[in-house]
């Protein structure tokens, strides 16, 4: 709270003898309670935080919110890059935000400068691994297209429908393909998730 308001609240609770409390102060009554304190769980706290009422596109550098980039290894690990997310936050605590997808909590993100070296290394490793996976899928796609060129349409449909021909992470690959401009992924280096400059054109007109 702002200092004058905080000072007033402190003085009221500590010094004001309240008639409804038999002349005791609110602090006196609080300290005399013997009931076990009940604490809300983490999910209840997250849902009680302020919501912006809009979505944000997760960039390679994270979520651009109130002139800061917030990121976390969980954003990359859960394939949230280039997906729209919701944000909940504490208005006077910019040290973190909570990231939701379709109303479900997915990650806690932190400003770049507050990430530990271990978190930065983990984030870069995840992105490199995902790019390596994207390249492998791209090569597999080229192989399938070569086969398709020599295969009857009916056989091609059967091949596409055969679960043995599909990898276990095909859904994740679709996200990667969209995020990595897969047509150029063979030549492109894995992006640096902590490089803010590469996101400047992506957030133009974002207004966040």
Image: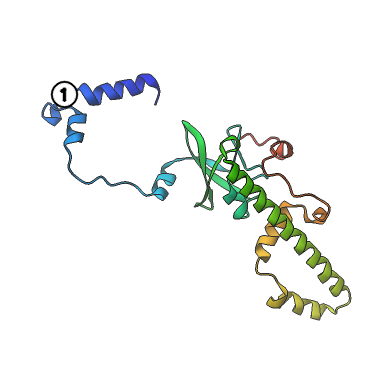
- Where does residue 154 sit, x and y in percent of width and height? 80, 80
- Reply above or below: 171 against 124: below
- Where does residue 62 sit, x and y in percent of width and height? 63, 43
Task: Answer with the quarter of the image where residue 65 lies.
Answer: top right
Left or right of 172 on screen, residue 53: left
* Residue sitting at the far top: 4
Question: Is the residue marked by circle 1 packed among few (<14), some (14-19), or many (20+) residues within 10 Å?
Answer: some
Residue 56 in view here: no
Residue tagged 1: 17
The residue at the point 34 percent across, 47 percent down is: 40
Question: Circle 1 — which element?
Answer: loop
Left or right of 157 on screen, residue 6: left
The residue at the point 75 percent across, 50 percent down is: 190
Residue 27 in view here: yes
Q: Nearer the viewer, residue 26 or 51?
A: 26
The residue at the point 23 percent across, 24 percent down is: 14
- Where does residue 32 sit, x and y in percent of width and height? 16, 36
Q: Nearer the viewer, residue 201 or 74?
A: 74
Left or right of 52 on screen, residue 122: right
- Where does residue 158 sit, x and y in percent of width and height? 75, 79
Which quadrant of the figure contains the N terminus?
A: top left
- Reply above or below: 76 against 30: below
Which quadrant of the figure contains the C terminus?
A: top right
Q: Nearer the viewer, residue 197 or 50?
A: 197
* Residue sitting at the far right: 150
């Amino acid at each position: 709270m702002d200092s004058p308001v905080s000072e007033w609240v402190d003085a009221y609770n500590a010094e004001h003898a309240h008639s409804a409390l038999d002349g005791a102060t609110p602090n006196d009554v609080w300290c005399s309670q013997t009931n076990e304190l009940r604490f809300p769980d983490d999910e209840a706290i997250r849902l009680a935080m302020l919501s912006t009422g809009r979505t944000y596109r997760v960039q390679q550098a994270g979520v651009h919110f109130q002139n800061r980039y917030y990121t976390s290894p969980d954003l990359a690990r859960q394939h949230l890059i280039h997906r729209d997310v919701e944000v909940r936050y504490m208005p006077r605590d910019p040290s973190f935000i909570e990231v939701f997808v379709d109303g479900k909590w997915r990650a806690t993100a932190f400003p770049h400068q507050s990430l530990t070296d271990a978190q930065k290394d983990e984030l870069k490793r995840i992105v490199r691994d995902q790019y390596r996976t994207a390249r492998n899928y791209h090569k597999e796609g080229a192989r399938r297209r070569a086969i398709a060129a020599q295969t009857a349409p009916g056989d091609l449909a059967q091949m596409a429908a055969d679960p043995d021909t599909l990898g276990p992470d095909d859904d994740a690959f679709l996200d990667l393909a969209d995020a990595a401009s897969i047509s150029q992924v063979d030549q492109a280096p894995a992006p640096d998730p902590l490089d803010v400059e590469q996101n400047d054109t992506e957030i133009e007109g974002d207004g966040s």
